[in-house]
Amino acid sequence: MSRIGKKAIQIPSGVKVEQSGLLIKVSGPKGTLQMQCRPEIQVRIADGKIEVSNPEPENRQKKALHGTTRALLNNMVKGVSQGFQKEMLIYGTGYSVKEQGGKLILSVGYAKPAELPIPKEVKVEIKTPATKGNETPAVFVLSSANKQVLGQFAAEIRRVKPPEPYQGKGIRYADEHVIRKEGKAFASGG
């Protein structure tokens, strides 16, 4: 039996969970999310808890679905009550970020700035719009109630210009550690 799947999810105050058949709808102060559960897994809402159970614990696929379903439901409850955030940094001289007309515009050393449409569930807060040399990065924070949409959008942003290993220029997550390489060493001719 899945160790994650066995844990019941506590429903915090201010969060409302509704079940109609296989559809679970969770609403709270940060928004509303819904998920279609798989028919192999049983979800029960009672006494301020969401309980996920697996009728066939020896089946390998159902065992995996058991833990996954519980984790997805837990992320929905956490998302509508607290929300999720990802802080991103842009390193590189002259690089900048701005929000304009529902798009995130990234100037990261290419001939044209990269324009990414912002999903309607994601909010962007720009703390520092432009870099100051190679030491002070441009900083912006993405926030959403939907963890999957937030992570996907952050990955698309990072894909525009991943950090390079020599000077560390590029877009990275705030908690990401970039392994730096040493440049070419020139030997003095003799």
Image (spheres, helix red, strand yellow):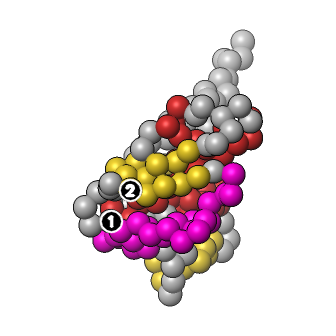
Q: Few, some or many C-alpha atoms within 10 Å of disc 1 (few <14, some 14-19, many ≥20)?
A: some
Residue identifier under label 1: 15
> Of circles 2 and 1, which is in front?
2
Secondary structure predominantly adopted by residues drawn in magenta: strand
First reached walking from the N terminus: tag 2 or tag 1: 1
* Pointer 2 with pointer 1, Cβ within 8 A: no
**Which contiguous range is marked in magenta?**
16-40
Residue under the point 70% across and 42% down: 62
Q: Few, some or many C-alpha atoms within 10 Å of disc 2 (few <14, some 14-19, many ≥20)?
A: few
Picture quarter with the N terminus: top right
Left or right of residue 94: residue 166: right
Q: Secondary structure at mark 1?
A: loop
Q: Secondary structure at mark 2?
A: strand
Residue under the point 40% across and 48% down: 9
Left or right of residue 80: residue 69: right
Judging depth in this view, the residue of 172 and 43 nearest the camera is 43
Outermost top residue:
190
Judging depth in this view, the residue of 102 and 134 nearest the camera is 102
Q: Is residue 51 covered in magenta?
A: no
> Is residue 96 something that shows in the picture?
no
Judging depth in this view, the residue of 186 and 145 nearest the camera is 145
- In the rendered image, residue 85, in percent from the top left (x then y), is placed at 40, 57
- In the rendered image, residue 7, in percent from the top left (x then y), is placed at 44, 39
Q: Up-down: is 18 above or below 164?
A: below
Residue identifier under label 2: 46
Residue under the point 51% across and 79% down: 120
Measured in 3D between alpha carbons, the distance from the residue under mark 2 to the one under mark 1, in whole angstroms, is: 14 Å
- In the rendered image, residue 29, in percent from the top left (x then y), is placed at 31, 71
Q: Amino acid at mark 1?
A: Val
